[in-house]
Amino acid sequence: MKKIFPNAAAALEGLCFDGMTVMSGGFGLCGIAENLIIALRDSGAKDLTVISNNAGVDDFGLGFLLQTRQIKKMISSYVGENKEFERQFLSGELELEFNPQGTLAERCRAGGAGIPGFYTKTGVGTVIADGKEHKEFNGETYILETGLVSDLSIVKAWKGDEQGNLVYRKTARNFNPMMASAGKVTVAEVEEIVPLGSLDPDCIHTPGIFVQRIIQADHEKRIEQRTVRERENA
């Protein structure tokens, strides 16, 4: 199976449709599939449900899809850096399903592992628990959370080979491995495609069986919030 595609647009060809569910890896702007997000925007697919830790910033990442009103619903854990997201949500233009961050990660992991649901203490006694099944284990109350699966997962990795085996770099790993496994189709963009056999099998984070398409691309790697201090006088 040929998995390497020449660019992001080609890699998404035939995969995008209105009303689809998309998992988008990354944390803030770290480890996001920059090029695939732009290709998704350019596909014109609308009424999207996007599962992502956050919604990018106003002029980068998933913020591009908010600008074009292509996102109908976000399933997220943190969305505090995007003014357009705030505006659309408060005006009722955008649906939002908030998740505790660990719960969101586990929902993606569960979906990839074929687990339809799991119980967790996180959120008990808060609005997170409203409408969810409660169950006691050893005298403690837990709530039922469901696993998540997407029509398309777009992820960003450091290195990949022609079979789609992926290695992430440090904190850029974040949500990417869980989301890669939970997509009905997973497309990865990497900084470098390496020859088959050159990746240490013990260091592969996402096995190629989870990845259907892969591209090599350049990345801007923006810093979401740059904090500096004045140089002290010598």
Image: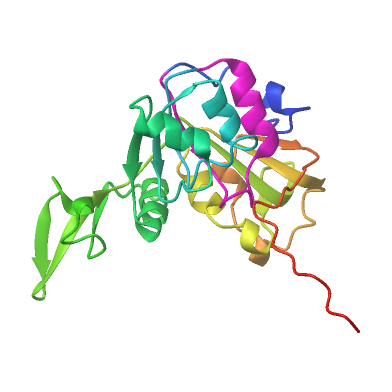
Q: Residue at x 69, y 62 (%)?
A: 227
Which x, y percent locates residue 6?
78, 27
Residue 31 belongs to the span the image colors magenta: yes
Of all residues, the one furthest to the front in this rendering is 233
Which x, y percent locates residue 188?
64, 40
Query: Against 193, is 140 above or below?
Result: below
Q: Indicate the quadrant containing the C terminus: top left, top right, bottom left or bottom right.
A: bottom right
Residue 85, visible in the rendered structure? yes
Residue 79 belongs to the span the image colors magenta: no
| Foreground pick, 169 / 55 | 55
Q: Is residue 187 left or right of residue 6?
A: left
Residue stretch in magenta: 19-45
Q: Residue at x 52, y 28 (%)?
A: 66
Q: Is residue 21 left or right of residue 36?
A: left
Which x, y percent locates residue 32?
63, 45
| Foreground pick, 64 / 103 | 64
Image color mode: rainbow
Which x, y percent locates residue 175?
52, 53
| Foreground pick, 58 / 9 | 58
Q: Is residue 47 left or right of residue 82?
A: left
